[in-house]
Each structure stands twice: as C-alpha cells, then as structure tokens.
Amino acid sequence: MKKTFTLAASLGLAAFLSVPPLAWAQGHPPAYTPGLGDLMNGAVQPHHIKLGLAGQSANWALAGYELDELREAFEAVAEYQGRWNEKPIAEMQAAIMNARLAAVDAAIKAGSRQGFIEAYAQVNAGCNSCHLATERAFVVIRTPTRSPFADQEFRPAKR
C-alpha cells in the first residue's frame, strides 16, 4: 500500500511539474519576467563579488567557477532584458564586458594574482561605464573589501 501511494504521489508530482513547461512550449510565456534590477542584484552582483573575493584569495578554481556563473548571469540579462528603457543592454554588455571578462579568464588560467587584480578593476570600470550610459551612474561598483557570504570560505582549500 505504501509503495502504491509513493508511486501515485510521484506520478502526480511529475504531472504537476510538467504543466508549466508544456504551457510555455505552446506559446504561453512564464508569468514572471525578471526586471533588470532583479537580475543585476540577484544574479550578476553576487557572482561579481564572489569572483572578486576568490581572485583576491588566489582561489583559481573558485574564481573560474564564479567567472562562468557571472557570464551566465550576463546571458540571462541579455535574454530577459536585452532592451531596457530603449537602451540596447545586450549589445552594450557584450561590447563593454566581453574583452574584460576574457582578461580576467586569462589571469585566472595563468594563476596571476596581480593580473587578476588589474583585470577585475577593468571589469568594475566596465560595469560603471554601462551604469553611466544607462543613466544609473549612482550605482557604483568596486572591488569588494569583505564578504557578505559569511558561510563561504574563499581561500583555497588545503589539500
């Protein structure tokens, strides 16, 4: 009896969870589209901070991971808010950030702390130039000086 109930509950849950993707595939958009601020504060900024902290600590594995996550967050911005207030956010983001993120990637792969610090400063400058271009100059990005993630270690793990 217990196995039958568990199976029925599992099938019911699977059917329930399949409804939204099926509806979307049939041309019905999701009910919520994240705003630009939601994406910047909830996806871009946390990965930007973690990237900075990992690089400052020379934790290259974590820095590489956070760089990939930051790129994915920027992809979400381009997908959901490619145009914002008549501004081509996706195009601006690519033009301003791609080379800067590539420089961070090169520093991570080289294990160069100084190279990372310099490239990361350029990422910050890129963020701020985009904020200026979108009339959000009051949002100033800088290198983090402490972690808001008290539950995460940013130094490389001792092996």
Image: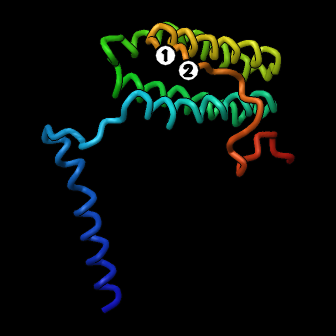
Percent from the top left, x then y, of residue 50?
67, 35
Q: Residue at x 20, y 42 (%)?
A: 24
Check the picture and name the quadrant holding the N terminus.
bottom left
Residue furthest to the bottom in view is 1
Scheme of colours in the image: rainbow
**SS of the residue at dot 2?**
loop
Amino acid residing under circle 1:
Arg
Q: Where does label 1 land, which residue?
A: 136
Q: Is residue 78 left or right of residue 15?
A: right
Q: Residue at x 34, y 19 (%)?
A: 82
Percent from the top left, x then y, of residue 112?
81, 19
Q: Nearer the viewer, residue 153 or 62?
A: 153
Q: Is residue 118 left or right of residue 12?
A: right
Amino acid residing under circle 2:
Val
Residue furthest to the right in view is 158
Percent from the top left, x then y, of residue 104?
67, 18
Percent from the top left, x then y, of residue 81?
35, 24
Q: Nearer the viewer, residue 105 or 91?
A: 91
Q: Where does label 2 land, which residue?
A: 139
Q: Is residue 69 left or right of residue 79?
A: right
Q: Residues within 10 Å of mark 2 (few under 14, many from 20)?
A: few
Q: Residue at x 55, y 9 (%)?
A: 129
Q: How many marks?
A: 2
Q: Residues within 10 Å of mark 1 (few under 14, many from 20)?
A: few
**SS of the residue at dot 1?**
loop
The alpha-carbon separation of the residues under discs 2 and 1 comes to: 6 Å
Label ID, residue 4 = none
Looking at the image, do the residues carrying marks 2 and 1 touch, with CB atoms under 8 Å apart?
A: yes
Q: Nearer the viewer, residue 16 or 2?
A: 16
Residue furthest to the front in view is 138
